[in-house]
Amino acid sequence: MINKLVGRIRQTGAPIVVGLDPMMKFIPEQIQERAFAEYGETLEGAAEAIWQYNKGIVDAIYDLVPAVKPQIAMYEQFGIPGMMAFKKTVDYCKEKGLVVIGDVKRGDIGSTSEAYAVGHLGKVQVGTKICRSFDEDFATVNPYLGSDGVKPFIKVCQEEKKGIFVLVKTSNPSSGELQDRIAEGRPLYEMVGEQVAAWGEECMGDTYSYIGAVVGATYPEQGRILRKIMPKAFILVPGYGAQGGKGADLVHFFNEDGLGAIINSSRGIIAAYQQDKYAAYGAEGYADAARAAVLDMREDIAQALENRG
């Protein structure tokens, strides 16, 4: 799957992943009204609004980007109907040829971690049948319970030729409370990055490992350090746009081949119509606004890479 991701990035010229993180405040009123007219102001109504909103965005951007990243909590809050919308979104994106990164941030041990890995990336036995559950291409994984929590995912990745992105240095302001702690004279995130590189050595695609890392755009200097520590790991970079990251901050996340990183933007794209820059599209044109935001982001990153020293 890492080879497919690399191939799609080369094909589109856009090292971009669109975060499908729907919140009701992002969903235009006309979509909510249609969903509520059919299902009422219920969990089912909310899930239908989410699904229709996602579908409009995917239809507008699937030819521009290699991947999408649905954040499971935004669906899970609406219970079983929300999870059904998550699954419909995953399946639809795959039909459109997109690589799907399930932003699930799972981290547990033993049989629990095995079940998470199977549920999101693998296959499950049901009587005499083998079934797939959510069936994303990649999943995000929290490593802070140690290798017991990560190795079940690696095993499924090896079996299924899928991948994971391990949380190393996250984009949130308080990440340093733990991730920057000094251990044996070094920040903890550097040690986690070394572990990701070690796990990845035995999980190689053609040029990159399918064991990647999450490193926030809001920490460009740490990104420079971690890029050297994990030369064969793809880095998923959240924090572009709404969280303050911009193209000039991102160049050190990439290798000299122009690959090695994929930059995430969520509400900066899916809710672009609510920004002054794209307000002319209006709520009816929310999907077209999302497309315009992708094109602008692609240009910003391309110029930054072209101008890097």
Image (cartoon, helix red, strand yellow):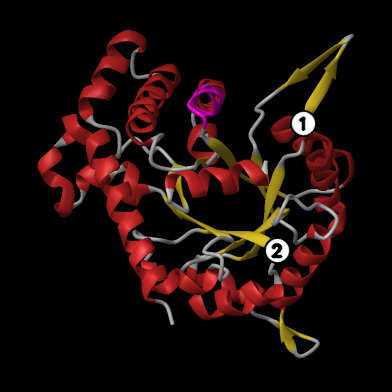
User: Toward the viewer: 86 or 234?
Assistant: 234
- In what element is the residue under mark 2? loop
Give percent across and percent down for residue 110: 89, 44
Other-residue count near label 2 (Cα within 10 Å), few / some / many at <14 / 14–19 / ≥20: many
Which quarter shows the N terminus? top right
* Magenta extent: 87-97
Report the residue marked by disc 2.
232
- For residue 101, which quarter of the picture? top right
Give percent across and percent down for residue 254: 54, 67
Q: Tell me which residue sits at (35%, 54%) in the image.
A: 298
Left or right: 157 in relation to 99: right
Give percent across and percent down for residue 72: 55, 38
Amino acid at the residue labelled 1: Gly
Amino acid at the residue labelled 2: Lys
Left or right: 11 in relation to 199: left
Task: Confirm whether residue 139 shows in the render.
Answer: no
Q: Tell me which residue sits at (42%, 69%) in the image.
A: 305
Q: Tell me which residue sits at (39%, 31%) in the image.
A: 58
Q: Does 116 appear in magenta?
A: no
Task: Confirm whether residue 179 shows in the render.
Answer: yes
Report the residue marked by disc 1.
122
Residue furthest out toward the bottom? 185
Relative vertical location of residue 164 with respect to residue 256 in this rendering, above or below: above
Left or right: 45 in relation to 281: right
Give percent across and percent down for residue 57: 34, 33
Q: Tell me which residue sits at (38%, 18%) in the image.
A: 45
N-term mark: 2 or 1? 1
Query: Can you tell which of label 2 and label 1 is closer to the viewer?
Result: 2
Q: Does 90 appear in magenta?
A: yes
Relative vertical location of residue 173 with respect to residue 138 in this rendering, above or below: below
Q: CA distance from mark 2 to mark 1?
A: 24 Å
- In what element is the residue under mark 1? loop
